Amino acid sequence: MRINQALKTMNQRINLGITSDMHVHLRDGSMCDLVTPTVRDGGVSVAYIMPNLQPPITTLDRVVQYKQKLQRLAPKTTFLMSFYLSPQLTPELIHEAASKNAIRGVKCYPAGVTTNSSGGVDPNDFSNFYPIFQAMEKEGLVLNLHGEKPSVSRGEEDIHVLNAEESFLPALRRLHHDFPNLKIILEHCTTRAAINTVNELNANVKNPADVKVAATITAHHLYLTIDDWAGNPINFCKPVAKLPSDRRTLVEAATSGKPWFFFGSDSAPHPIGNKAKHIGVCAGVYTQSLAIAYVAQIFEQHGAIDKLPEFVSQNAWNFYQLSKDQLQSQDEVVLYKDSQVVPDTITDGDKIQVAPFHAGQKLNWKIEWQCK
Amino acid sequence: MRINQALKTMNQRINLGITSDMHVHLRDGSMCDLVTPTVRDGGVSVAYIMPNLQPPITTLDRVVQYKQKLQRLAPKTTFLMSFYLSPQLTPELIHEAASKNAIRGVKCYPAGVTTNSSGGVDPNDFSNFYPIFQAMEKEGLVLNLHGEKPSVSRGEEDIHVLNAEESFLPALRRLHHDFPNLKIILEHCTTRAAINTVNELNANVKNPADVKVAATITAHHLYLTIDDWAGNPINFCKPVAKLPSDRRTLVEAATSGKPWFFFGSDSAPHPIGNKAKHIGVCAGVYTQSLAIAYVAQIFEQHGAIDKLPEFVSQNAWNFYQLSKDQLQSQDEVVLYKDSQVVPDTITDGDKIQVAPFHAGQKLNWKIEWQCK
């Protein structure tokens, strides 16, 4: 099948439509200046932006200012914004932000599980936030879950980086049960258990508009397993890449065309010095500047290049109920076969250097923009 | 129990006897000059030395020269030497080396699993080495196994850093079955599965002299789990530290007093620059210069300080059938309660810097030598 697919895709040009990456970290300061334009370089038109700046984004003013800043840096990219779930949010603020189209969702970080998550919530008890979720449900906002429980070692209740996601799944089920009309995304899912759960929660879904629980999948988790980050901090991220069986299940899900799976790169840039450390390495893999090419390569390897438009465009479009009038640009992305080598670093030529995923390795695809 | 133990051990001085560390990497060149004297600093009298230099030690000349060099650097330390299992070894060489007391055992590295193991063997098929094992069995030499299978991802046979040791256990059983009188050590074991297997293989052992299959346990694996090396290359080693349940089982085994478990630090120094990298981090944790203090701390935490002499002295003494006339010194080690902080680096003041395990953290014990 692979050989046939290779022949079929040779010289092929594939219009992916208006592409989206529904989990993007653009940071602040010089890093933001460097990476924000790379959203478009990587072949992404619509980007859902994470609010875990320092301090986290929890006010209308800040989310508006941040969006303006991003828009100045990348005028043709559509930025969908989010709040950081915290006690500072109120139902009134949610309603106000929604009425002004300032946000499309709220991101929930369990405390302490990843970069800038120390202000996060206790995933064992979301009840304090139920009034927020009610307001979100009413407004059609999306709840974006970093679905991990914090590590703890106490006998039968051990939680560690390998089972942290699976341990979170009952909380996902409970949230969906308590808010059946709230749109929820299990972000950057990494395990067979998570994929199975999301499939199960969608067992009765008849058409894409009915999907309430979705999952994003990153580019790098389609490639990596635990062996790839053992000894290679560049591949260390949270949730950590798991076992080969998990990776295979992620690839199956991403290439399935199912409307509840779509692309969220979780591209998370760190200065290279924060990766090349013997202690305290920052979690995160940077894939933004070649986002679509990384994904296309895996889809091609699995004979599923024809499923790519669903994964990087249509499914998120439907779930987030996007419309063309919300876009900064209606440009579309065309994928074509041409090899390129991932550069060693992405740099502003001054202070910031970021090592991209799979630096030095060959990719088989490039993208170009079809301007409208 | 912990409080009682703490009271009991306060102001306590414990004579550990002639201590041993049966898995030690002393390297070559400047690193060797730096770390060899730290065997004694760490409270170890007898050290079993790994042969994975570059190139590996496979000749009588080299093992003799290496031992002489180590002896010059640390005249009071007893070095037990080993060959690196490879096709270059012959039964004749084994007999000759044994007759000259040049080696006490042979180390087997599966190809590609850890530092300088590229010349290793295929753990799926040891049959080529059966003549070597026969010669070793006859000479009473010890087979030291790095018990991991190399990673491979192919569906039902996935092997990865987490199950690499467990996947090796059938090979251990087979070797013991085929060579019931060969002394075998599963080195630096890290899993509940390994501990259970070694216990099982000793089910009928009536006294220490009958033990044929033993296991060494490092200091760092008594502390670490997967969460500790995720993002902290300083704690990355092979085999990797596993789950909290595995760690608890290792502590139980080490503190059990059972004669088939004893200390092998696998202290594996790397220049700090080879740890602080974003790709290609070297595997290995350096514990040598505080070896006994690290272990004592864990034993104390678990109310088992009275079991420490078995773990760091008697069990290895019996298994390796050591005798006082083989020693460079009959000095004994006395452990006493006094706090110290692990230094940030061990350095020769020139080019080499090594970051020790738990740098900056407090240890509750010190050692002193009781000279004979």
Image (spheres, coloured by chain):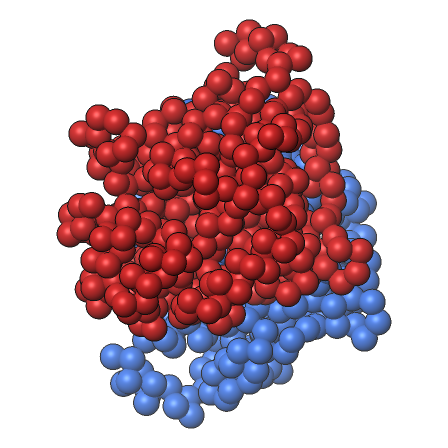
Chain colours: A red, B blue
Occupied quadrant, residue B360: bottom right
Report the side of A178 relative to B19 (left or right).
left
**Horizontal side of residue B136 vs B300, given as left or right:** right
Outermost residue toward the right?
Answer: B350
Q: Is residue A129 left or right of residue A364?
A: left
Q: Is residue A66 above or below residue B209?
A: below
Quadrant in the picture for residue B156:
top left
Can residue B79 be seen? no
From this viewpoint, is residue B333 visible?
A: yes
Q: Nearer the viewer, residue A123 or B139?
A: A123
Please provide percent x and percent y for residue A17.
Answer: 52, 27
Instruction: Name the residue located 46 percent from the left edge and 69 percent from the top edge.
Output: A61
> Residue A54: image x %, image y %?
51, 70
Residue A318 image position (x, y, % from top left): 36, 34
Q: Nearer the viewer, residue A169 or A139?
A: A139
Q: How many discs mark residues in the rendered view?
A: 0
> Is the N terminus of chain B in the top left, top right, bottom left or bottom right quadrant?
bottom left
Answer above or below: position of A246 versus B17: above
For the point 37% across and 66% down, which residue is it? A120
Most distant residue in the left direction? A178
Whether A340 is drawn above or below B10: the answer is: above
Quarter occupied by the C terminus of chain B: bottom right
Is B105 above or below relative to B122? Answer: below
Q: Quadrant of residue A297?
A: top right
x and y, in percent, of residue B347 in the image? 75, 72
What residue do we see at 56% from left, 22% from top? A15
Residue found at the very far front of the displayed protein: A325
The residue sitting at 80% across, 56% down in the picture is A349
Residue nearest the observer in this picture, A321 or B20:
A321
